[in-house]
C-alpha cells in the first residue's frame, strides 16, 4: 500500500510540474460541479412505560447539504472535493441530534445530549486524487462509498465517509474487482475523521485490539449481467473483526410482471487480539464474535406497483456475540427498515450493541408496497407502506415496525418526503447481549431536497 501511495504522489507531482498553466487550467475549467440543499425536520417520541421511566420527546430542524466538484481527466488524473454542512435552527430544550452532531456529542463528551451534539458543523467530506488507465484505477483520499457494511447512510442529512486508498480493475464490462485500504471514518453526524478501528471500539480500542489505532482492508467482487448479479465482499478490520458478505439476484419477466429473487449470507468473526480478549472477557461482548445471517427477498413489479417480501435470520449461537456488528453505517439485511437498522450503533464506540432484526436469534419478515401515481394523473407522487415483524426467543414481545412514506419527486431537481414511523416494542441489545424494549417509538420526518 505504501508503494501505491508513493507512486501516485510522484505521478501527481509530475503532473503539476509539467502542466500547471494551460492544460491544468482546462482540467478545472471543464470540470463538473453539483450541489444539493436539504431541509430536514425530525421528531422522535419514546414511550418508556415498560421500565417505569419518563416518556421523552425530541425534535430538530436543520438546513444543510453538499457542494461537489470533479475535475476533468488530465492524462488519466482527476481530482474532486465535496463540502458538507448542517445548520440547525429553532431547537428546543430536547433535541433529536441524529440530523446534527450526535456522533460529535458521543465522541467528544461521552453523551449524545451534550452541547456539542446540538451544534451544526461543516466538513470537507470528500477530497481525493485519482488515476485511471484503461481498465484499472487508483483512488486516494476521502470518499463516500456505498457497500453492504460500510455505507453512506443517506437516510439522514449528510453521508458518512471513509479515508484511505483503493484500487480497482475491470475484468470485463460488467465485472469489477476492488481492493481498498481505509484508516479513517467520518460518521454522518460528525465533522471528524477518526481512526476506523477506534471509531468502532472507542476508549476500549487498545484493550481489545492491543493498539490505539488500526486499519480496515476491503476486497470486493461484483458482477452485473442483464438477468443476474453477484456481489462478494471481505472486510478485514485489523485485530478486531473479519466480515464476509455475499449476495446474488436473478430477474425474470413474465408477461406484465417483473420478478426479482435475491439471497444473502453474512459471516462475522472476531480475529487476532480481539478474539483473544473477548474469549477471556465474555462479560464485555457476550463472548467471541461469531455471527451467521441469511436473507431472501422477492420483488414483484406490476406496472406502477411494486411488492416486496423479505425474510432474514441472524442465527443464534450460545456463549458467543451472535449479533451483527455494524460499526460503519452498514444496514445490510433485506429486512432493514427506516428506523430498525442499527442507526446509532455506528456512533463512536457503540459497535458492539445491536438493534431489533440484527440481534442474534432474530427472525424478520418484511412486507412492503410502493405505488407510483403517474398513470393516475399525479405525476411524481408515490407512496410506500412497509411492515416488519421481528421475533426472537429472547424478546418479551415481538417488535413490529410500521413505515409510511409519502413522496413527491419533480423531474431531476426536487424531492419532498413525509415519513411516519411507528415501532411497537422497539428492541435493543447491549454489547453483552442484555435486551431492553420500549413500548412505542414514534417518529415523524419532513425532508425537502433540491439538487442543482
Image (cartoon, rainbow, N blue to C red):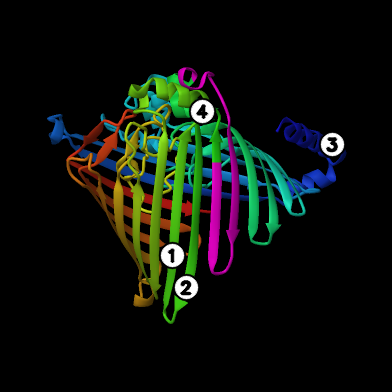
- Residue position for label 3: 14
| Residue 389 visible somewhere in the drawing | yes
Q: Which residue is mark 2?
A: 252
Name the residue tied to disc 4: 197
Task: For label 4, count other residues whose C-alpha is less than 10 Å away and answer few (under 14), some (14-19) or many (20+).
Answer: many
Residue 11's disc number:
none
The location of residue 157, given as percent across then percent down, is 43, 43
Label 2 near label 1: C-beta < 8 Å? yes
Residue farthest to the front, as pictured: 318
N-terminal of the pair, mark 3 or mark 1, is 3
Assess whether mark 4 and mark 2 are in contact (beta carbons under 8 angstroms).
no
- In the image, taking residue 406 as reference, residue 67 lies left or right, namely right
- Mark-to-mark CA distance, 4 and 1: 35 Å
Q: CA distance from mark 1 to mark 2?
A: 8 Å
Number of residues whose C-alpha sits closer than 10 Å to that of mark 3, classed few (under 14), some (14–19) or many (20 or more): few
- The residues bearing labels 2 and 4 have C-alpha atoms spaced at a distance of 41 Å
Bounds of the magenta segment:
206-234
**Pointer 1: what residue?**
261
CA–CA distance in space, label 3 to label 1: 50 Å
Q: How would you rate the neighbour count of disc 2 (Cα within 10 Å): few for under 14, some for 14-19, many for 20 or more?
A: few
Picture quadrant where residue 278 is located:
top left
Earlier along the polypeptide chain: callout 1 or callout 2?
A: 2
Quarter of the picture holding the N terminus: top right
Helix, strand or loop status at disc 2: strand
Quick check: 289 above or below 167? above
Amino acid at each position: 500500500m505504501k508503494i501505491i501511495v508513493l507512486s501516485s504522489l510522484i505521478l501527481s507531482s509530475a503532473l503539476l510540474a509539467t502542466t500547471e498553466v494551460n492544460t491544468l487550467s482546462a482540467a478545472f475549467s471543464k470540470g463538473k460541479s453539483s450541489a444539493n440543499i436539504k431541509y430536514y425536520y425530525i421528531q422522535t417520541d419514546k414511550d418508556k412505560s415498560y421500565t417505569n421511566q419518563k416518556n421523552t420527546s425530541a425534535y430538530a430542524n436543520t438546513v444543510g447539504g453538499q457542494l461537489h466538484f470533479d475535475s476533468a481527466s488530465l492524462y488519466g488524473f482527476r481530482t474532486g472535493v465535496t463540502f458538507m454542512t448542517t445548520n440547525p435552527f429553532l431547537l428546543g430544550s430536547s433535541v433529536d441530534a441524529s440530523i446534527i452532531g450526535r456522533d460529535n456529542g458521543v465522541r467528544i463528551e461521552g453523551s449524545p445530549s451534550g452541547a456539542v451534539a446540538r451544534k451544526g458543523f461543516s466538513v470537507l467530506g470528500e477530497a481525493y486524487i485519482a488515476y485511471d488507465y484503461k481498465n484499472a484505477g487508483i483512488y486516494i483520499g476521502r470518499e463516500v462509498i456505498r457497500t453492504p457494511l460500510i455505507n453512506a447512510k443517506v437516510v439522514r442529512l449528510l453521508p458518512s465517509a471513509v479515508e484511505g486508498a483503493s484500487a480497482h480493475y475491470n475484468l470485463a464490462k460488467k465485472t469489477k474487482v476492488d481492493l481498498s485500504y481505509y484508516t479513517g471514518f467520518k460518521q454522518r453526524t460528525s465533522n471528524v475523521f477518526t481512526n476506523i478501528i477506534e471509531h468502532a471500539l472507542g476508549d476500549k480500542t487498545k484493550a481489545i485490539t492491543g493498539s490505539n489505532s488500526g486499519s480496515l482492508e476491503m476486497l470486493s467482487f461484483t458482477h452485473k449481467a442483464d438477468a443476474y448479479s453477484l456481489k462478494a465482499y471481505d472486510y478485514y478490520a485489523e485485530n478486531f473483526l473479519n466480515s464476509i458478505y455475499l449476495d446474488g439476484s436473478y430477474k425474470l419477466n413474465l408477461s406484465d410482471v417483473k420478478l426479482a429473487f435475491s439471497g444473502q449470507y453474512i459471516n462475522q468473526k472476531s480475529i487476532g487480539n480481539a478474539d483473544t480478549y473477548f474469549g477471556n472477557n465474555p462479560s464485555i461482548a457476550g463472548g467471541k464474535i461469531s455471527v451467521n445471517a441469511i436473507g431472501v427477498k422477492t420483488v414483484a413489479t406490476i406496472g406502477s406497483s411494486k411488492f416486496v417480501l423479505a425474510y432474514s435470520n441472524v442465527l443464534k449461537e450460545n456463549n458467543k456475540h451472535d449479533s451483527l456488528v455494524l460499526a460503519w453505517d452498514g444496514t445490510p439485511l433485506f429486512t432493514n427498515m427506516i428506523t430498525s437498522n442499527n442507526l446509532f450503533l455506528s456512533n463512536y464506540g457503540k459497535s458492539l450493541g445491536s438493534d431489533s432484526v440484527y440481534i442474534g436469534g432474530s427472525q424478520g419478515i418484511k412486507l412492503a408496497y410502493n405505488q407510483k401515481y403517474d398513470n393516475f394523473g399525479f405525476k411524481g407522487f408515490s407512496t410506500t407502506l412497509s411492515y416488519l415483524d421481528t421475533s426472537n426467543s429472547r424478546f418479551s414481545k415481538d417488535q413490529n415496525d410500521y413505515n409510511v412514506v409519502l413522496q413527491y419527486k419533480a423531474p431531476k431537481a426536487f424531492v419532498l418526503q413525509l415519513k411516519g414511523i411507528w415501532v411497537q416494542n422497539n428492541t435493543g441489545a447491549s454489547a453483552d447481549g442484555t435486551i431492553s424494549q420500549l413500548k412505542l417509538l414514534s417518529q415523524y420526518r419532513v425532508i425537502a431536497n433540491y439538487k442543482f
